[in-house]
Structures are given as C-alpha cells and as structure tokens.
Amino acid sequence: MDTSAISGQWVNVDCSSRLAVACMRQQNYTAPLCSPGPWKEGQIIYSPGFPDDASIPCDYLFSVNTGKKIEVEVLFVEANSCCDRLVLIENYIGGTVIANLTGEISDRRYTTKSSNFMRVSWQPDGGVNVRGFMMRYREVPCVRIEHYLLECSNRDEKTAHIVNATCRSGFELFRNGECRGNYTRLTPYWDASPNPSIASCKQIQAQPIIIRDAMDQSYWSSKATGGYALLGLVCNSTSKQWNWADGTVLNYKPPSGYATDMDKDCVPSMNWAIQSNGYWYSGAAHNTFTADVFCSIPDSQPVPSPNGCESFDDDSDDAICYQIATTAENFRNAQMVCKNVGGDLASIHNDRENTFVRRLAVSRQALNGVLIGGLLSGNDKAWTDGSAWDYDHFYPGFPINGLGQCLVLDTQGTSGEWMNVDCNNTVAVACERQQNFTTPVCPTEPPKEGQFVVSPGFPFDASTPCDYMLMVDAGKKVQMEILMLEANTCCDRLVIYEDYFAGKVIANVTGEFNERVYTTSTSNFMKVSWQPNGGVNVRGMMHDTHIHNVVNFADNASFPCFELNAFIRNGKFTTQTAKALILSYSNQSLAMLALLFFKPVTSVLGAAIRVDRVENPTDLEVDLLHEKYCNALVDLFEKIKALYNVPDDQDINFY
C-alpha cells in the first residue's frame, strides 16, 4: 500500500522487497495457553503467554506418519541466555537432545534423526522481559540412497542395559559382601608417597588390598599373575608400625615369606606388593616397577527401616513403598528388576501417588521418564500387579493406537502425565512393594510351579541354609531358573541336584549372576540346596520352577514351521528361516523348541513356559502370552546362535 500519497492505493511488488509491515489482531487479544495439542502440520505454535508473558513452562508433543521424520522450524526465540531454554528432543521419552536453544534466534530448522516423534520443551526460569518463542513443524520423508532405505523408526536405538549387579564390571563378590577386582595398572617408584594404590582405589570409593588372614592371602596371591599387586600398607608415623589403608593394624604376615624391612620400624616412603607365590616384597628407592592395583568395594545388606520400606521410599499414605530402579532395556527386564527387590512394577491409583512417583524419579535423576506397570491392548487396560484400573493420567490424545502397549510416566515436565510407548524402550523403572515387608523363611512344603522362591531372610539375611524339593508330574522334567544369585565366592554356594537323594550334581554355583536355567536330565524331582557359610553382606538367591517335557526325536524329523525375520544391525534386511515346534500345551505349561532350519534335529532346545489356563481370555491376556513366547524365542536364539555358526551381529525380530 502506497503511503507516500493520501490515496493509499495498492501496487503489486516482488515478495522479497524490504518494506514495513502492517499487522492486525483481535481486540482483547487472548494470550495462548500451554496445550499438548494435537497440533496440525504447519500450524504456528506460540509459547504460553506470548508475547506478554514468557514465564510459563510447556511441553509440546509432535507426531507424523510412521516411516517419516519431523522437521521443526523455529521461527523466533527470545529468551534470557542466563535462564530460559527451548529444548528439542528426539522421540517422546528417553531420546537424545536435538537442540538446546536460548538467546535470540530466528529461522532455524531441526529434524529428528530417525523418529516420527519429537518433544519440544519450553523451560523458562523466570522468562523476564522476553517474549518466548514461535515455531511450526512439518513431516519430511526418510532419505533413500540407491536401493537402501535409511530407516525411520518410532523409537531410539537402545543404548543402556539392565544392571542388577552389586559389583562393578570386572569385579566379583568374594567375602563379606566385598566386590574385588583389578582396577588399573601403574608404574610407580618403590618409594612413591603416598601409596599410589590408595589414591587409585579412592576414585571408585574402594580400598586397596588388605590381607587379614590365610584366606585373603591365598586369594590375593592367586590374582598377582602380572608380577606384582600393590598392597594397601601405610606407615603409622606415631607407632612406627605398618597399618592397613583402613586404619587397622597389620596383624598377619605371610608364612610364604616377606622382605625383612617388614619387621623394622616402618618408613613412610616405602611401598609393598604381593607376588603370585605369596611373597611380600618391597624394592629399592628411586626404582620403578609395574604392578596391578586391585581394589575392594565394601557392601552391606539392607537394614530394616522404621517405616517398613527398607531401601524403598514411603509415600506416608497407603502402606505402599516405591523405588526408582536401574534402567531396564525392555518390559520383561523391568519386571525382573522389581522382582529382584521383592516388588512389582508400580501401579498408580490417584494424583498423590502419581506426584510422589514423579518426584521420586526426578530425585533419582530419572529425567527421561519411568516405566510403570500398566499394559494396553486395544481398549483394555490392566496393571501387572493385578490391582483395579481406577485411575489414569494420560497426555491429551494418548494412548495413541499402534504406538506401544507399555506406559511411561513423564518426568521431564511437572505434570507427570502418561504416554504409551514400545515395550522395548530403554527407560528407568518405578517399582512398588508392600510396607513392612515380611522376610521369608525356609519353606516346609515344596514350592509350586512358577512360584518365586527366595532364600530365607532375603534380602536382609542370607545366613540361613535351606533345601528346596521341586517336583513335577511323572514323565516330565524339572527346570529351575535362577533369577538372581548374590553369594560370597569364598564361602556360600547354591547346589542343584538331580532327584531328591543320591542324585548327581547338576550345578554348584556361587558369586553374582542373573537368569540362568538348569534342567534335570531325566528325573521329575530336583533338590536345590542353599548352603551359606556366613552369607555375610549378600542377599542370597531367587528362583522359580517350570515343567519341562521329556521328548525324543529321530534325526531329520519333520516339524511344522513358520518364518522368522532376521534383522541385521548394518541396516540390511534378510530372511532367515527357523523352525519352531510347540511341543505340548496343557493346563499348566507350554513348552517350545526353536531350531535353525539348516541343522538336523538331534537334541531338544528351549524351556518350558508357564501358562495358567484361563477361560475366555481377554485380548490383553492373549497378547501378553504372545509377548512372553516371542521373548523366549529371542532369548533362545541369542543363547544358541553360536552353536549353529550364526554371526554374532545377527538378531531376530518378529513382525
């Protein structure tokens, strides 16, 4: 519009011309509010209160069609760089940060790497005297290079693993709940001061080698295979006697021998090392040597707390205790994490519980959401602990059909709203347990099939021995899965026998591990014997029992089969045929066998899967059984693929 004359007439011009702009808006303008949508592609989206008030935080959840990616165009940001941020995140939960923006910017574009979901989080800390932001999004296709599709998926690649272990990687439980292991290798001077092993072990809140008796001496000399292993000895300048790094007095000397300086007044600038023959040695000053630094990380059993929640947290209301457990790589692992501490995945029944779990998760740095115990199937919803579905707190528009059957409570915002996700998402876990947890005793009756069995006193006291007699129907075999074992390798053992009496030993195990399966060769009886020698500062064991059919096959037998798709991690797809046979189905069990097609059948592989008979099962119950069966096939494939020369980087997925 021409403003150089009073007529105000119009002319058409090139749209790239630089001119002043005339704007309009409705009288009594209503500032935008925080809303999760749903948003339309291309719609202009403003921060709450724009442009007069930028102090209100808000999260925006964008989605496009499966197989596509999201591009967000940040049209305008005005934020205090000290305090206010706009964060773009791949996926809804647990994704990587695409961009973390502040200050004053305009016309920038950001695209998800592979997901068709994006979360945009406006996080002002005051938003003082700034306007906020303005943006829009659109769908973009995945890129094709030659004949290969760069896959777009609805979840991030898994980057975390479940960690149930007490000991760090490379360390082992040996005695009194101590985790012992080789931490590093150094080349110090013999007269280096202070003792270099003390400083090294302190980095992991541990102590260097301390030897109090013949058992410690034997253990550490067996580890000194690299020549020398540094001892945690220090000189007490007052008494002129050698002390250990924890302040205790040296009151044991090896019968295998030691350098004569050990019997003299101690010298601060002198280091000692143990050799593989058990000899304690100290070298000449100003000379270097190479030695391993072994460390011991002390541990202790949980102690019953006054509120009855022990290692869990009390919400002070309904006799339920909660805890945020270590990250799990899928729903099945999440269930095991909670079972290992005597609990279940958390069910939530009101706003107060929801807020408590969210705040607890944030305090444990679980900032990418937590998995809760809800499952979806169509319109059906259920809690895995069997409690009534009497409350939910979904984001508007959720659950989204096809997005996933599992539920995650959002901890990135303050609302704690829920969304449904793929059950293979890697995410932290919310567990629950009854208050005043009753510690178990040695049972007087055989456990039932599928029952979780724990050692007496679990998890507070592992010192009580106990024998468990397991039995299934005649003509069947017994399969026992050790869900968790935590035992001192010096002293405590779990022994598994074929039959009740005079049977051979199937396994004699100790230390720390999860999810190992043992099966009788022919008998329908098994004896499981927990044999602690002190059980100091360890939790003991947890196991369950299954029926396993006794089946004989001729070579090259013919079986019904179905196709399984094998996914190669390098992005190319191939089809690998596997044969699966349902061996039996009864009121109690479903047994299965999975064999690669190119191997003649000469042995039975696999494990029994417990199935309770349910009249008129719901879709959710059927889906849960299917998921359980498929998970078992995947686990079996991983365990046996090396036997059939399948490449280690080959996976198996179901579509």
Image (cartoon, rainbow, N blue to C red):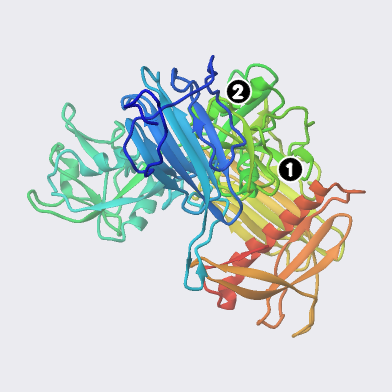
Q: How many marks?
A: 2
Q: Is residue 40 visible?
A: yes
Q: 129 left or right of 371?
A: left
**Which type of secondary structure does the marked residue at label 1 adopt?**
strand
Q: 34 left or right of 633?
A: left
- Would you name the residue on which mark 2 appears? 355
Tag 1: amino acid: Leu
Q: Position of residue 220 (x, y in %)?
A: 35, 52
State the residue at coordinates (72%, 80%): 601
Q: 345 left or right of 177?
A: right
State the residue at coordinates (73%, 64%): 520
Q: Position of residue 630 (x, y in %)?
A: 70, 60
Instruction: Report crowding for label 1: few under 14, some 14 to 19, many 20 or more residues within 10 A (C-alpha).
Output: many
Q: Position of residue 493 (x, y in %)?
A: 58, 51
The N terminus sits in image quarter: top left
The image quadrant of residue 554 is bottom right
**Residue found at the far top of this picture:** 28
Instruction: Report crowding for label 2: few under 14, some 14 to 19, many 20 or more residues within 10 A (C-alpha).
Output: some
- Would you name the residue on which mark 1 appears? 376
The C terminus sits in image quarter: bottom right
Which one is in front, 67 or 11? Answer: 11
State the residue at coordinates (62%, 36%): 38
Which one is in front, 41 or 24? Answer: 24
Which one is in front, 125 or 527? Answer: 125
Marks 1 and 2, Cα distance to the nearest angstrom?
A: 22 Å
User: Is the residue under label 2 in contact with that under label 1 (CB below 8 Å)?
Assistant: no
Tag 2: amino acid: Thr
Above/below status of 202 relative to 149? above
State the residue at coordinates (40%, 25%): 7
Q: Is residue 303 visible?
A: no
